[in-house]
Image (cartoon, rainbow, N blue to C red):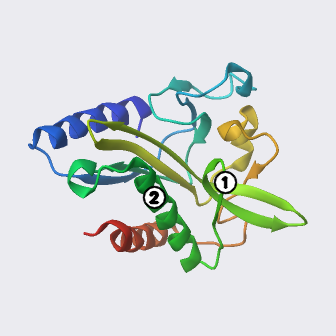
Amino acid sequence: MPYEDAVRAMEDRAAEIRAGTGSEMVWFLEHPSLYTAGASAKDSDLLDPGAFPVHKTGRGGQYTYHGPGQRIVYVMLDLETRGPDLHQFVRRLEQWLIDSLAHFGVTGERRHGRVGVWVELGAGREAKIAALGIRVRRWVTFHGVSLNVAPDLSHYDGIIACGVPEHGVTSLEALGVKVSMAVVDAVLKEKFEDQFGV
């Protein structure tokens, strides 16, 4: 789905949720290859501006890549009814991803001061496998998470992903987990309900 179309749809649904005319939504999709610049993005972290289209976005965070082989999940929930605690919401998103990765035998971990989910690669190396970038308006959330299933990881070379130059990125495929997007989706849906309910 084109990024601009997704943002418009999210904005509309978030407004409907706030107005009480629309239901919450968890939206699974993929984008064509592109970079997004969050509210904290630094110009110096865009290493190759001509590689892919760059979209400025109102979500939190810095630069990230989206593209085929990456599962994007946009999460539009009403935190006013679920509990207006943004820190807890972020922790639950991270735990959802950690629990989903565990299903595939991958140990995902949090890092102090770094949002997202990380994996140890051995020899003191680590890499990010899932990113979070959310926005909240009047306690309705939108934007969400991205999980690297089998994207072309070389596409991250045009940015300093999430403003962290000392660590790379990885994917389930790069870790030796060959799995279809449909299977990943089924696990994500199951583990989401464990964290957030039906």
Say which residue label 1 marks.
Answer: 112
Between 119 and 177, the residue placed more toward the observer is 119
Upstream in sequence: badge 2 or badge 1: 2
State which quadrant residue 137 falls in.
Answer: top left
Q: Residue at x 68, y 49 (%)?
A: 152
Residue 159 in the image, given as x and y percentages of width and height? 71, 33
CA separation in Å, label 2 and label 1: 15 Å
Count residues near mark 2 (Cα–Cα under 10 Å), then give few for <14, some for 14-19, many for 20+: some
Residue 97 in the image, given as x and y percentages of width and height? 51, 64
State which quadrant residue 120 falls in.
Answer: bottom right
Above or below for 94 versus 64: below
Looking at the rendered image, the quarter that the C terminus falls into is bottom left
Say which residue label 2 marks.
Answer: 93
Q: The residue tagged with tag 2: helix, strand or loop?
A: helix
Q: Residue at x 48, y 50 (%)?
A: 145
Residue 168 vs residue 194: left or right? right
Residue 28 vs residue 62: left or right? left
